[in-house]
Amino acid sequence: MGSDRSIPSLTADSLNPKVLKCEYAVRGEIVSLAQKLQQQLQANPGSYPFKEILYCNIGNPHSLGQQPITFFREVLALCDHPTILDKSKTQGLFSSDSIERARQILDQIPGRSTGAYSHSKGIKGLRDTIAAGIEARDGFPADPNDIFLTDGASPAIQMMMQLLIRSENDGIFCPVPQYPLYSASIALYGGTLVPYYLDEATGWGLEIRELEKQLETARQKGINVRALVVINPGNPTGQVLAEENQRDIVEFCKKEGLVLLADEVYQENIHVPEKQFHSFKKVCCSMGYGDKAIPLVSLQSVSKGYHGECGKRGGYMEVTGFSPEVMEQVYKLATLNACSNISGQILATLVMSPPKVGDESYESYLAEKDGILQSMARRAKMLEDGLNNLEGVTCNKAEGAMYLFPQIRLPNKAIKEAESRKKEPDAYYATRLLYATGIVVVPGSGFGQFPGTWHFRCTILPQEEKIPAIVSRLTEFHQKFMDEFRD
Amino acid sequence: MGSDRSIPSLTADSLNPKVLKCEYAVRGEIVSLAQKLQQQLQANPGSYPFKEILYCNIGNPHSLGQQPITFFREVLALCDHPTILDKSKTQGLFSSDSIERARQILDQIPGRSTGAYSHSKGIKGLRDTIAAGIEARDGFPADPNDIFLTDGASPAIQMMMQLLIRSENDGIFCPVPQYPLYSASIALYGGTLVPYYLDEATGWGLEIRELEKQLETARQKGINVRALVVINPGNPTGQVLAEENQRDIVEFCKKEGLVLLADEVYQENIHVPEKQFHSFKKVCCSMGYGDKAIPLVSLQSVSKGYHGECGKRGGYMEVTGFSPEVMEQVYKLATLNACSNISGQILATLVMSPPKVGDESYESYLAEKDGILQSMARRAKMLEDGLNNLEGVTCNKAEGAMYLFPQIRLPNKAIKEAESRKKEPDAYYATRLLYATGIVVVPGSGFGQFPGTWHFRCTILPQEEKIPAIVSRLTEFHQKFMDEFRD
């Protein structure tokens, strides 16, 4: 001590190796490149053969022009600035039911301010309303004490990984392809991702036989598989599970002692009339198990659905079938961030209790909601058709969620070219697409895919009037790319 | 496989042991007990000798009746519901500068919606404004690319722990007493808390000799000390560091190769005219080091200050002196939660760029701000005097922050009684205080304290008119407690 030793400064080598290992493709390399191109375009508008960067990498509807639901925003604004609630001018600016709803919500908040920390699970009155919303959705009771309001679904996912993973011998069963926050957070907490492959040939089907096979393989390697992640509707794959299939999954989890992590954030995003969303909680209850049969975590978010309020960071997890001792540990983790943001809590509540028939806002609310959902379905179909018209590309039906995940069969020469640049072939394709068209998609390798197949994920979110031009640009690029590398 | 094995259900024993180990006193046992009492009071108003639970355990001003700053809430409401910006009635309800500010902010948001995910560091235009605010505060430049907007300071603290801690051989240097989120997050990420004691006799002074001594001790044990946490103004201790002392701390970090984690969330909360807040960034720069001398993380939050907007979950960290490779890893961690909530981002920006002389809201803003800060200073003094009048209690001056941390010298019989109940003596005292008065304070053992001393933390936040009654109740309880256990 005391001598001026030459101490190495903070280097990447000296950081937590789990942080270094973790990768998150949705906001990865291709997005950084897109941001660079955008800056160049702003400085030199003629520098690329396109006028704007079109971010199809992330489900971020408002950034692409989708308008918020008026009623939701009225209530949020009034809750944040309640001193105008009693002024006569307010009645001319806000709907009567938004004024009433804001009053009801403020009555439930200790201190009547959105600026107060709440209970770490969220404001009790709001959780009561959400529980009633779940009950209305499922036809089975929900307990407000099982609900944890969160800053979106991402922190809930990370919290569960932190809770369940002790070492690399603990495995989390994830679909492949999967939403890469799962692989990233499993890496961050030092666990092992145990993959199960969705079957592209049957529209990204989830086969119990595949689960059994992969579980056996993992257990033979000494992996203690702790939880099964199911994303329904699927991300990036868009499939909607059949209720029968969900029952089999519940039985499987029950038999094998797995926590079921049900990522149900796209529950409102169903694009085809022949499919319906069923929550795993409802499926469990309808099997006569009640909510104690298996440890189940159901995730919901304000970022998705027809509202798409990503920037609000709101959501909840409904945690059932956990013992009181384990619940206490979940609660302790929740306390470390004090509470989730109150506007997000309010919005998560509104999403589960929107205007009802007879409310002043009901008609306009319904028109806004249906307008968005119907347009999303049309956009999904147009993009799906456009993709299926491309040489060597097949794209499953987008039944739900906000994405298409086409398979691209690339010529060997293109694969070799990518290899020579030390890139995955789909990452090379996505980079070339970005440079040629300004369209940002995420390479399939970021989600995982069956070895030897290549995909990309593209959102269905650009404005509807832009979709034909996007399909044209994509078609033109693809044609040239194939011509360039044709074997 | 296939046989119905009896698989143990999810038990606390099978969880991540680091989660089990972690403790967070601010929302710990005493608070759960208080919530239980509150429920009993609601059911049976006469069941305790008090009418309400008074939460002095946590810095949560709005929950105790503090009003939000009008200008801030006007801007937030308008940003959330911008369709009213152009309506004439809006001008009668909102100040002209809030309307103008909301327009400016919306111009900076991609998609002009608070419902869009932003860049994972936060909206660039808002970071520009915050950088300008830091520059105005410090008189030295700030780079918007060094700023990460966060959901309050808590996630920033956890992110830094996650980044720096590789194993229990990595140590984080923390003051004792300390804000227990530090001990909790160090436990959660599996590191070692290396303590340095603040000197109660010199008003919770931070002595470089003590740092040197403890660093040497830790290194002899094989601990690789990675970072020094300094909380200024102090929490729970309330002291404000002198600039000279801060320079010595910077030199110490430079010499010893430590990251300086400067928790500066109480920078606006200074209660005595003879003290001033100096950011560590400014101190570094004023020493001629620029901002590259040491890796420095400065934390700011919207939860504290005069605004106290805890429920908004807003804040930022300014990260300087990190290499580009390390910054990339910080950024990657930030991407895992997509972005912090946009209302919190806006509020963090408003706090760093409040109304200026000449703006319509300036006078009312200043009156609200000064009213709150002056009342806090009066409340701090009243409570400090009241505590110093108690037998065996000494309380240092509350120079800053929102807390008092009195030392209570308990009779041996009380200590024995606590031991027989398997409680820390100060936890026993706090529990008895709660049952007798409804006042919730946090035992000093939750923050750490010099062995053999006992304290509690009490916020200065109850409404000013309630303070005399609180002091009376506290005095009456303390007198009885001492009489009961007098040696």
Image (spheres, coloured by chain):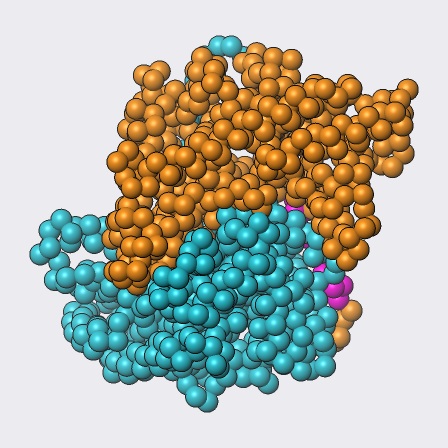
Chain colours: A orange, B cyan
User: Is B169 situated above or below B244?
Assistant: above
Please say whether residue A100 is visible from this viewpoint: yes
> Is A453 in the magenta?
no
Q: Position of residue B29 (x, y in %)?
A: 32, 53
For the point 36% across and 61% down, the residue is B89
Q: Position of residue B460 (x, y in %)?
A: 32, 73
Left/right of residue A195 with respect to residue B469 in the rendered view:
right
Write the start and end of the magenta stretch as one range: A7-19
User: Is B286 situated above or below B404?
Assistant: below
For the point 47% across and 18% down, the residue is A273
Question: In this view of the protein, which residue sits in the foreground, A156 or A220?
Answer: A156
Question: In this view of the protein, which residue sits in the foreground, A369 or B90?
Answer: B90
- For the C terminus of chain B, give its image quadrant: bottom left
Q: Position of residue A254 (x, y in %)?
A: 43, 19
- For the N terminus of chain B, give its image quadrant: top right
For the point 71% across and 46% down, the residue is A52
Question: In this view of the protein, which residue sits in the foreground, B426 or A332?
Answer: A332
Please say whether residue B237 is visible from this viewpoint: no
For the point 66% across and 41% down, the residue is A55
Asked which quadrant contains residue B27, the reply is bottom left
User: Is A379 situated above or below A365?
Assistant: above
> Is A11 in the magenta?
yes
